[in-house]
Amino acid sequence: MQYLGALLPRITRLQALVIGLAVTPLLLGGAGVIALLLFLMASGGTVTGAPEQPIAFDHSVHAGEAAIPCQFCHRGVVTEASATIPSVQQCMFCHGVVATDRPQIQLLQAHWETNTPVDWTRVHRVPDHVRFVHAPHIQAGLDCATCHGDVASMSEVRQVRSLSMGDCQGCHRENSASLDCATCHK
Amino acid sequence: MSSAHEASARATAVATLGETIPTDAEVTPLDGRRWGMVIDLDRCTGCQACVVACQAENNIAINEENRVLERRAKTWIRIERYWEGEFPNAKARFIPVLCQHCGNAPCETVCPVWATYHNPEGLNVQVYNRCIGTRFCANGCPYSVRYFNFWNPEWPEPLNNQLNPDVTVRTKGIIEKCTFCLQRINRARVTSKNEDREIADGEVQPACVQSCPTTALVFGDLNDPSTTASRLAESERRYTLLENFGTDPSVVYLKKVDPHVEIDHHHGHHAETAGKHA
Amino acid sequence: MSTLGRRRFVMGSTALIGGATVVACAAPERESQVQSFVLQPEQSLPGQELWFATACAHTSCGNSVVVRTIDGRAKKVEGNPAFPVNQGKLNVRSQSGVQSLYHPDRLDTPKKRRGLRGAGTFNNLEWATALDLLAEKLSDASSVTIITGPISGTRARIAQDFAGAFAGEHLVYETIESSVWRQVAKAGLGVDRLPHLDIANAHSILSFGADFLSTWISPTQYSIGYGEFRQGAGERGRLIQVEPRMSTTGANADSWVYVHPGQEGALALSIAQVIAAEGLTGNDNWFDAVNAVGGLDALNAYAPDLVAERTGVPASRIQEIAREFASHQPGLAIAGGPALASANGLDNGLAVILLNRMVGSVGRVGGLLPNPGPRTGITPPVVPTTFEALASRANAWLDGDSPDVAIVFDADPVYGMPEATRFADALGSIPFVVGIGTAMSETLGHADLVLPATHAFEEWGDFAPDPMPGQQVAGYQQPVITPFVTGRSFGDVLLTAWHEVKPETAPTWETMRDAVRAGAEQSFGGSGDFEARWIDLLKNGGAWNTAHGGSFSPSQDWNINLLAEPQFSGDEIEFPMHLVPFESVALGTGDESANPWMQATPDPITSTTWTTWVEVNPKTAAALGVTRGDVVEIRTLHGKFEATVYESPVSAPGIIGVPIGQGHRFGGRWREDRGANVLAALAPLTVAGAGGLAWAATRAAVTPTNNFKQLPTIEVVPNARNDSEEPVVQISHE
């Protein structure tokens, strides 16, 4: 292919090194290097402790004691990619009158009054090259707890599954869902 | 689509990664779809609308002047222009060239880390986070439609507000290329599933197809005889690019019509070859 | 079917009431955080895509767009699928609207001049201070001139009425004028509006220099028709393009014919002579048309043998063109580009209209169709001020007869007017110049007060496409995001100042939104609640009907004289080359050249990006001793500039083609000090009888500079694919 030779200029030494690194194990049959590389790239999220939140929102009170359905607040989950964090306004529908004397609720009211968004700390996150869409999982009848654990009993929400590629695939395999890379990798 | 090389590459990957690599049996066709594009060269005017639409949709880095001079500009779809003859009988010919999503893709067999593969719907997929940048695939591609990221892309703020959240921003050291706007296909898949129906013909339009003012580009399922794309692909004017390489592209071109050119019927193509791109 | 039908089309006003709502939901910078809305707009969820219909970033392009927004940010611009002008399609420049919106060098604060005019040094001001200064200057002014780009609708109405209230005038500046084509329509067809070209239904098109697939008049609209023309349901149309420099449209023609600059009309009359002499038309009334130009005797003076040498087209070729055009009817003949930008451009245009009349294409499907005017209540597009009129204004200003204040918006005459007109100096003689825009331009660089405008995607408006697509169309514009910077729209600035300074004459509405809504109610109101109709107008991006309107009344008495040689600036000895400036598809006249996508978009013919090149025939280049990449100096009687040689096999000897759109001192990092401005070096020649700038009538001398610049093209080196036995572009006879 002379064409490509013409299109791409001569490679630099650094690039040669990178290519060399990739080629050498192939030649030597060194599957270990590949395994390492692939492992590094394939590894996804990890199970973590509960991060600190700007407002100590307690799921065990809302989802547990009050038994509010998840979708009441996470409105996007049925139709959208993102489950969505409720707006301050939605919190205020109740907390305009409920428990207004508690310090944490007053934090919330301060956001409402000053018209500033709440910077929640993310608990669940997939890498940028993954497109996770909630909707089809809910439509397929999966319970929120399948991935998120028993949130109704958590005071502070933490991640309970690794949500790594292998984790996703295991479930996809069990449920005969698509195993095509392009389904999730964007 | 299997070759000895491919099988061994997969075997290596499976050996090292275990179950995260799906087996052939698991990646069975979902519904026998083959996404493809038909490009009518008689409609194409070379106007570049597709080129800019693609840049906008797919977070393609700005092709600064130096990138162009170094021939490292990235254009997942580009309009190649070929000269024929000399003034006053000179002609310019245009052809949009993008990833051909070959059924028998030279790029797929040479990837040592399984970063590029053929998906059950006929897409040639590039898994960015798996790519280690050997550029073997780009060297193997006869269409020169795989682009290597020699630099991290930059969008001076606040230009980054325009970036499409559905498409990964590619970093230095990996190969990128046309995806047939995979994000749009996936959106349509989710939408249609939510509405409990099939994806309709014309529902998925890659950005280039969507913008094309003359409707030179048509996208659809080539395996479904009822789609506009598959109907057009049966045209008598059909050909595929560099057919003798046997790559089985999913992009079908319809020949430019020129009532004034002399056709060499013996060889099946016209006498003044439009093979030069400069 | 349209995919867009499934998208969430929404109307913006409810999402945007209370600016803080959407501002507060800015995409989180730190990925470890996720923000919650304070207020959840009713129609939107975080991460959800919403599509808003609005006007294209250049409302003068006549296109309506839909903008994809996510979390209050504009992501992608596409054509509005329902809008009859562009039917979901969009050209390159309109697509780059998101880049001018989020341009890092976008104006975000008012500025007051510090130092000399044109030096480009400014002090930042608060908005309140800037508006006070404007009000002070306006109240002291005895007359105020408004200069804008081509506008229509409420914006035009406010500009016109404002100029009236302040004893001034509204000038409309168009860099490459449509005014000659307008004048041709008026003199030849008896209409005040641009005609509709029914390209889709034509079986042949004979275009004299009109680059209608790329930049001429309404290219998106015409390209849609072209697709049908080529491979639609009917017979495949034939395109014959006649021009001195091969344009993108020329590159797509079945027959491309070189003609000497300014001789297009003589060639058209010669074709007419062949049609008459050989009886090629089946149109019974062709003789009436010929009589309008003085009968067959007059036409015979243009017989192919007599004009072959003058036009540069062999007599046999003229006959072929006539036969091919006449035998594929309905046929459409159009004139544009250099054909109308010669000193004799008006006569060239009328000669082309004659061809349409002879074959019966005036008022016929597949030919020229009359366009209806805008709906009652919508201000029609303001007819652009001709170059001649603007140049005479400049002279008057230089002589001290100037307004006290000029307000410039969306027009860059300092860039586009030839330096010979001394337009920058003329503007400098106006005591107070206000520039309103989203980014700096050459004209704003000469202003005393610069006000940051809202972007087209941040403001309210309405427009009447010009030309309409053969049916009555009204376009509406709404903000698709909350303004990203604290800009104010042109209309709002004028309304605020008007209410402040002359409340007694000011209109009742105080904002553009109110003005646009009031205008819409006047046009589309009627019985019942208007709110629902208003929301529909915004959701759909406008309203249209299928009614065709208007009629032609072709003149019966034309005085076309193309026997004389057209006038050029510069003699043949000192300036041996014809300089043909042109608009490349992305650079255009420089309007969007600040956007990196536009700089990086290859010119279709040469594949060049990021610079100013000059197209030279290879043999001419050899004679000059230059080759690809050599920097040459191009000198005219009125200026000089440098450009890089591109040896083009489609270039004619004696012609040099130079793209417009580069050579800016202002406008941000991607376009400043890049390439050269060919317009500045043009002779201030006008098109006789039409007043337009004869921008293709300047001769030039080319001299090497001994400098070299590698051309940033995307072409692959020669012979790249010669290995292949198969041609890359394959050709079929039919």
Image: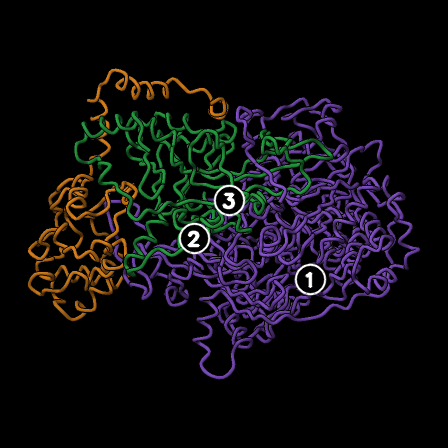
Chain colours: A orange, B green, C purple
Distance from disc 1 to disc 3, alpha carbons, whole Å, reads 31 Å
Q: Is residue C128 above or below residue C686?
A: below
- Residue bearing the label numbered 2: B227
Whether tag 2 and tag 1 are in contact, CB under 8 A, the answer is no
Task: Say whether residue B201 is left or right of residue C142.
Answer: left
Could you say which is closer to the camera, residue A128 or residue C470? C470
Q: Chain of mark 2?
A: B
Residue C385, x across and y down, in percent: 71, 58
Labels 2 and 1 share a subunit = no
Residue C246 x %, y %: 69, 40
The residue beneath circle 3 is B39
> What residue did someone put label 1 on?
C195
Type of residue at label 2?
Answer: Thr
Residue C448, visible in the rendered structure? no
* Mark before the other along the chain sequence, 2 or 3: 3
Helix, strand or loop under label 1? loop
The amino acid type of the residue labelled 1 equals: Pro
Callout 1 and callout 3 share a chain: no
Residue C720 location (% of width, % of height): 54, 25
Q: Crowding near pointer 3: few (<14 within 10 Å), some, many (20+)? A: many
* Nearer the camera: disc 2 or disc 1: 2
State the residue lying farthest toward the right.
C297
B198, above or below C445, in the image: below
> Is B98 left, or right, of C408 in this rendering?
left
Residue type indicated by callout 3: Ile
Q: Residues within 10 Å of mark 1 (few under 14, many from 20)?
A: many
Mark 2 → mark 1, Cα distance in angstroms: 37 Å
